Amino acid sequence: MYNFFGYFMAVYLIVFGTILGWFIIQFRIESRLLNKNKNSNEGVNLDGT
Amino acid sequence: MKPFFNNKKNRSGLVLIAAMMLFNVWNVIMNTPMVPEQHWAQKIFYVHVPSAWVGFLSYFVVMVAGILFFMKKDDYWDLVGLAAAEIGTVFMSLVLITGPIWAKPIWGKPWIWEPRLTTTLILFLIYIGYFMMRTFGGHIERVKRYAAAVGIIAFVDVPIIFVSVKFWTPEIQSHPQVEMAQQPSGILIPFLLSLSIFTLLYVLMLKYRIHVIRINSRVRADV
């Protein structure tokens, strides 16, 4: 007999975990790019020096 | 350019969609009927099918963006196509992962080479090729044209996936043959609600990804 609830939980964790992870990744990429853009506009090197 | 969620409309959209999604999960757990023989496994369907729907919708956007790119010669449509292709592939990956998880207890094995599964896998592989071509395709302007063309051609597979359960003989089918309209309202209404919430989520994700790709293009242009 299969543990149907376990399969249900696995699917919901994977789907919503992936969506949440996607937002976190986009947020981090966006922050990094905006910092880079800000630094280059201020005439500061990209490594912050 | 400002962070995407600095905009009040986008921030409110995120909060609203997150609340709707939580309600959706609560609704599926508490209010949908248990189907005999599948029990909890049947409730996988409330996120598996909307994921597939969002994947197909996203690939439709890739096709439309490809056509508009050729018509208007505007890079914005290339950017929309790329963002939609990425999100579509995230959701198609979810479909190809969650489908076998459902199939294991129901069919006894996670994968069967039947028409709908096979055509879905083909679509996913076409898009893996699409991203490889985007990365290694050479000259940027040529890659944009090829990507638009692949996006248009790849969409041909989507209607094939939809009709595959009728197109091939029932003997080689494993997917449920029941029409959605024949489902009882206790299943149909939560399913349509889930579909709508996933569609709203998709719109937000697409807007956000387009925003991030635009910042990336601008930073690259500055550097």
Image (spheres, coloured by chain):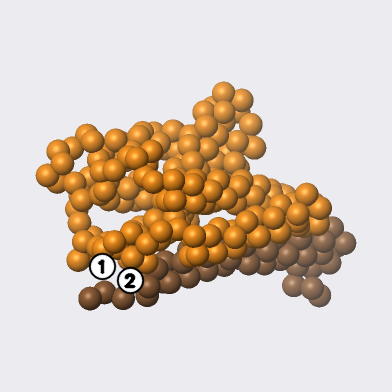
Chain colours: A brown, B orange
Query: Measured along the vertical axis of the image, is residue A41 above or below residue B134?
Result: below
In the foreground, B222 or B192: B192
Q: Are dots 2 and 1 on a single chain? A: no
Q: Secondary structure at mark 1?
A: helix
Query: Measured along the vertical axis of the image, is residue B25 above or below residue B8?
Result: below
Q: Quadrant of the C terminus of chain B?
A: bottom right
Q: Residue at x 34, y 40 (%)?
A: B182
Circle on res. A4: 2
Q: Are marks 2 and 1 in contact (CB under 8 Å)?
A: yes
Mark 1 highlights which residue?
B105
The type of residue carrying mark 2 is: Phe
The type of residue carrying mark 1 is: Pro
Q: Residue at x 87, y 62 (%)?
A: A42
How would you rate the neighbour count of disc 1 (Cα within 10 Å): few for under 14, some for 14-19, many for 20 or more?
some
Q: Residue at x 39, y 56 (%)?
A: B45
> In the image, residue B216 lies at what x, y percent?
67, 54
Using the image, name the chain to which the residue with label 1 belongs: B
Specify whether residue B82 is in view: no
In the foreground, B184 or B159: B184
Using the image, name the chain to which the residue with label 2 belongs: A
Query: Measured along the vertical axis of the image, is residue B173 above or below residue B69?
Result: below
> In the image, residue B109 lies at what x, y percent?
20, 65
Q: Residue at x 60, y 28 (%)?
A: B73
Q: Separation of disc 2 and disc 1 at Cα? A: 7 Å
